[in-house]
Structure formats: structure tokens, C-alpha cells
Image: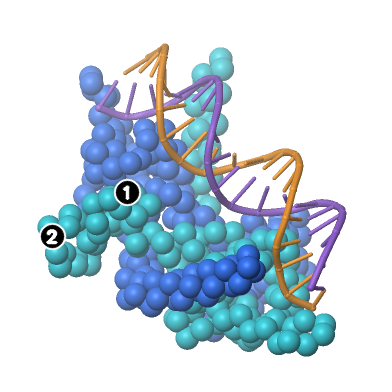
Chain colours: A cyan, B blue, C purple, D orange
DNA sequence: CGGTATCCGACGAGATACTG
DNA sequence: CAGTATCTCGTCGGATACCG
């Protein structure tokens, strides 16, 4: 388990991730202020991870990206890309030509994020069967309880 | 980059995470059906990761959990715990005593998930400064553009 | 103590229409 | 082509009240 000593305890510490402490200002003393969760809020949304994944293969234009991801609306792709650009995860390059051309590329930092994300996906892949079994068992238990109640 | 050959292509394949293909039924052919994203939907929500983290240290009762997490409502803690229980990440143990006592424990699978999550948090920790810089730069650029437009 | 039930506001996200 | 603007609806999550 990772434990990071708080460098300036007088600012107050916040149990961010169990034993993983981080230092923060007291006025940020909310769960939303947890920096460790920020990255999950970024890639935990509906589209970010998929965008990062496809850009991990190669640079793409807006329309190519939209075609590649399948299901994303133009609006949400724009919103997602702006967020990723703001965080320095993708670079947006506009070519002043007609018709317009905009390329999106993963930054080096974005590539390292993709590596970390793949770890998570790997975990998911190797535990999917176990999760499905747990769900089936839980749902069976729940259904049984419900049936007893309605008698 | 991870590429998993689709075992039964006739069921249709779906580009789940860039080059990471998974097999799925055609009637699940939505982005939400992506199994790789399921785990992110689980721990990407507002409270799951924090619950997993504090349970990673030791078994806790409901009220202890609520005290430990700070900011979570009773409702959301219940909802979160039910979800984690259903997925086999935590175990809920009810002791038939008065007053009631309910213990929550991380399963072995939950512990491995915590390890994977810590990888992500580690990434976040080591890139926070870079992300903040990127945001500041982006916001500065945006503010500048806005100022020019309103002239 | 450890929940459930209900109400309600805020936000995420799709559909659609319009633009440089 | 690559967006922006607006509307709308569904879901998330907090507050509150009640229960075994």
C-alpha cells in the first residue's frame, strides 16, 4: 500500500484514497477536491478513454475520430476533445485550408495515460467471468428474496 | 498495444478500446456494451473508489464507512455498496443482533482491483503538475481569444 | 444501527439546426 | 469539414422522512 507523507501537515491532510494521503488547502476539503479522483473523472466519462485509445494508434481528424468511435455525437466528441486538450492529453492542430482540417494527436503524457488505462482494462478482461458470476449469484439471491416478500 | 483475436467473428466485433477488440452480441452493439468500460463505470463514479480504498485497509461497518469517507450521503453509500457487492468486490455480512451490525469487507478480487486503481492514482500523482500547467496554458489562450472576440 | 422511500434540483448527453 | 447553439430528456446524487 502506498503512503505518501504529507509535506505540509499544517495545511491539513485529506484521506484521498484510503491510506493514500495528499495535502490540500482546507477550503478544498471536499471529496471533489481529491486530486486522485480527477484523473478518473477525466477518463471515467463516457468517451474520453475511447478517444485516447484510438488516438493511441495514430493521429486522426475530427470526422475520422467520429467515424471510428461509433455512437458518439458531434457535440460530445467536441466536448470530450476540448477537455482532453485542456489537460494536455491531446493536441489540436488546425490547418488554415478550405475545407478546414483539424488533426488530433495524443501527447507523450497522453500515451503514458493510455498505458495506465490499459492496466485497468487488462484487470477488467481477466475478471469479467468472475464479475459476471458474482452478478448472477447476487441477482439470483435478490430475486429469491423478492419472491418471498411478495407472498 | 494489446490485440485480442475475436474468438467468434460471426457474432460481430466492436472496437472497444482502439485496437483492443472484444466480441459481443450484435444486440449489445452499443458503447455502453463495451466490457472494458464497465470497470471504469464501476470505479469511475463518485464514491466506489474511495470505498474500495478504505476497505483495503480493514473491514468496516456501515457507519464507520460513512464517517471515514466524509461527504457521502447515507443513500449514496448504500447504493455504492450494493453495486460493489453485486460485482463481487465487497462482501456484506449481517450479524443478527440488536442493534444491527453489518460488516463490509473487500474480497480478494476487490483487493486486486485496488492495486490496479493505485496504478492510475500513481499516474495522476506524477502528472498533476503537468496537467495543471496544461490547464493554465489552455485557459490563458482561451481567455485571450475571448477578449479579442468581444472587442 | 442500518437501512428504504420519495422528492427534487443539477448535470450529462442526444437530437437537431445552423455557420465559417 | 469542423464545429456552435439550443432544446430536451434521463440519470445522478443530495435532503428529508420513515422503518425493522
Classify 10 Å Cα crowding around label 2: few (below 14), some (14-19), many (20 and above): few
Q: Are marks 2 and 1 on the same chain?
A: yes
Secondary structure under the numbered disc 1 in the rendered image: loop
Label 2 vs 1, first from the N-terminus: 2
Tell me which chain the residue with mark 2 is part of. Answer: A
Residue positioned most to the front: B151
Viewer-proximal residue among A114 and A39: A39
Give the residue at mark 1: A30
The residue at 23%/19% (across/down) is B98
The residue at 67%/66% (across/down) is A77
Q: CA distance from mark 2 to mark 1?
A: 17 Å
Residue B7 can be seen, yes or no: no
Viewer-proximal residue among B67 and B102: B67
**Which quadrant is the N terminus of chain B positioned in?**
bottom right
**Which quadrant is the C terminus of chain B positioned in?**
bottom right
Give the residue at mark 2: A9
Residue A135 can be seen, yes or no: yes
Viewer-proximal residue among A91 and B143: B143
The residue at 47%/86% (across/down) is A108
The image quadrant of residue B95 is: top left
Amino acid at each position: 500500500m502506498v503512503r505518501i507523507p504529507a509535506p505540509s501537515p499544517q495545511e491539513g491532510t485529506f484521506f484521498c484514497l484510503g491510506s493514500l494521503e495528499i495535502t490540500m488547502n482546507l477550503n478544498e476539503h471536499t471529496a471533489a477536491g481529491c486530486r486522485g479522483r480527477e484523473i478518473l473523472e477525466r477518463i471515467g466519462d463516457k468517451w474520453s478513454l475511447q478517444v485516447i485509445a484510438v488516438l493511441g494508434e495514430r493521429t486522426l481528424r475530427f470526422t475520422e475520430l467520429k467515424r471510428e468511435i461509433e455512437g458518439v455525437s458531434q457535440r460530445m466528441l467536441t466536448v470530450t476533445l476540448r477537455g482532453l486538450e485542456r489537460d494536455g492529453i491531446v493536441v489540436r492542430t488546425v490547418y488554415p485550408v478550405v475545407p478546414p482540417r483539424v488533426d488530433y494527436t495524443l501527447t507523450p503524457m497522453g500515451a503514458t495515460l493510455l498505458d495506465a488505462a490499459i492496466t485497468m482494462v487488462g484487470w477488467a478482461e481477466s475478471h469479467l467471468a468472475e464479475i459476471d458470476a458474482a452478478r448472477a449469484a447476487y441477482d439470483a439471491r435478490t430475486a429469491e428474496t423478492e419472491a418471498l416478500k411478495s407472498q
